[in-house]
C-alpha cells in the first residue's frame, strides 16, 4: 500500500532529486514559493522549496530501498527505523495551496490555535489554523511529521470554524523554531 512520505534530501538539490525519482517512476511533490533575490546587478524572482531539504514521495514502505539508494536522498523521515507516512489530508492541503496561486511563505510550526476550514475559493476544503500576520488573515497549513508550516492569505468570509475548537487560543500561539530532529539515518 502506497502512502506519502517525507524524504530528507541534500540541501539545494531538491529539484535534481525529484527529477531522479520521476525517472524511477515515483510520484513526488515539491511545494515551492516565490521570493525576490538581489544579485549584484539585478533583482529576480525565484521559486524555492517551501520545506528546504525535504520533498514528498508516494511509495510502498516495504519497497523503500530504491528510494534511499537514490543519490541525494539522506533518509526517509520516521521514528527509529520505521518511516512514518504523511497524512493524506496534509498533502492535499499543501497541493491545494500551491495550485491556488495565493501568496505563500514558510512560517513557524504552530502547536496551538483555532482550526478553520476554507469554504470558498481555490482553497475550498483545506483545513488549517487561522492567524493574523502583518495585518492580513492567513491560514496555516502544517505537515505535522516535519513540524513545518506554510502560511497562505485568505479572505475572512471564506472561513468557517472546525468542530472541536477549544476557544480563541490563537491569540497567543506558541511557536517552535523548526522541526524536532528525528532519526536521520537511512531507513533500508
Image (cartoon, rainbow, N blue to C red):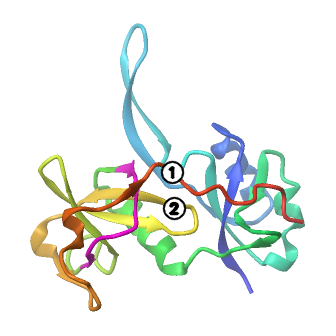
Dot 1 surroundings within 10 Å: few (below 14), some, or many (20 or more)?
Answer: few
- Would you place residue 125 above or below residue 51 in this image? below
Q: Is residue 118 left or right of residue 64?
A: left
Instruction: Tell me the element at label 1.
Output: loop
Q: Which mark is residue 147?
A: 2
- Circles 2 and 1 in contact, beta carbons < 8 Å: yes
Q: Residue at x 54, y 79 (%)?
A: 88
Instruction: Tell me the element at label 2.
Output: loop
- The x and y percentages for residue 41 are 39, 8
Distance Cα–Cα, label 2 vs label 1: 7 Å
Q: Which mark is residue 25?
A: none
Q: Mark 1 or mark 2, which is nearer the start of the sequence? A: 2
Q: Is residue 108 magenta?
A: yes
Q: Is residue 107 magenta?
A: yes
- Would you place residue 179 above or below residue 155 in this image? above
Dot 2 surroundings within 10 Å: few (below 14), some, or many (20 or more)?
Answer: some
- The x and y percentages for residue 24 are 81, 60
Q: Residue 77: which quarter of the image?
A: bottom right
Q: Is residue 96 left or right of residue 13?
A: left
Pointer 1: what residue? Answer: 178
- Count of residue discs: 2
What secondary structure characterizes most of the magenta part?
Answer: strand
Q: Quadrant of the C terminus?
A: bottom right
Q: Residue at x 78, y 50 (%)?
A: 74
Q: Quadrant of the N terminus?
A: bottom right
Seen from the viewer's position, the closer of residues 176 and 159 is 176
Q: Residue at x 46, y 48 (%)?
A: 177
- Chain part drawn in magenta: 105-117
- The x and y percentages for residue 11 are 66, 39
Amino acid at each position: 500500500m502506497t502512502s506519502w512520505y517525507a524524504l530528507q534530501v541534500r540541501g539545494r538539490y531538491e529539484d535534481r532529486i525529484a527529477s531522479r525519482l520521476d525517472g524511477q517512476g515515483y510520484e513526488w511533490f515539491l511545494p515551492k514559493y516565490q521570493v525576490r533575490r538581489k544579485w549584484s546587478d539585478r533583482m529576480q524572482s525565484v521559486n524555492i522549496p517551501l520545506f528546504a531539504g525535504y520533498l514528498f514521495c508516494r511509495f510502498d514502505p516495504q519497497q523503500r530501498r530504491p528510494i534511499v539508494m537514490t543519490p541525494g536522498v539522506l533518509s526517509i523521515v520516521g521514528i527509529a527505523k520505521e518511516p512514518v507516512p504523511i497524512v493524506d489530508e496534509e498533502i492535499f492541503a499543501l497541493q491545494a495551496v500551491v495550485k491556488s496561486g495565493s501568496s505563500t511563505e514558510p512560517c513557524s510550526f504552530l502547536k496551538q490555535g483555532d482550526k478553520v476550514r476554507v469554504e470558498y475559493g481555490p482553497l475550498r476544503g483545506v483545513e488549517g489554523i487561522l492567524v493574523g500576520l502583518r495585518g492580513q488573515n492567513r491560514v496555516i497549513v502544517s505537515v505535522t511529521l516535519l513540524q513545518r508550516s506554510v502560511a497562505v492569505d485568505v479572505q475572512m468570509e471564506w472561513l468557517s470554524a472546525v468542530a472541536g475548537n477549544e476557544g480563541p487560543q490563537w491569540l497567543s500561539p506558541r511557536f517552535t523554531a523548526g522541526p524536532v530532529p528525528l532519526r536521520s539515518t537511512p531507513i533500508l
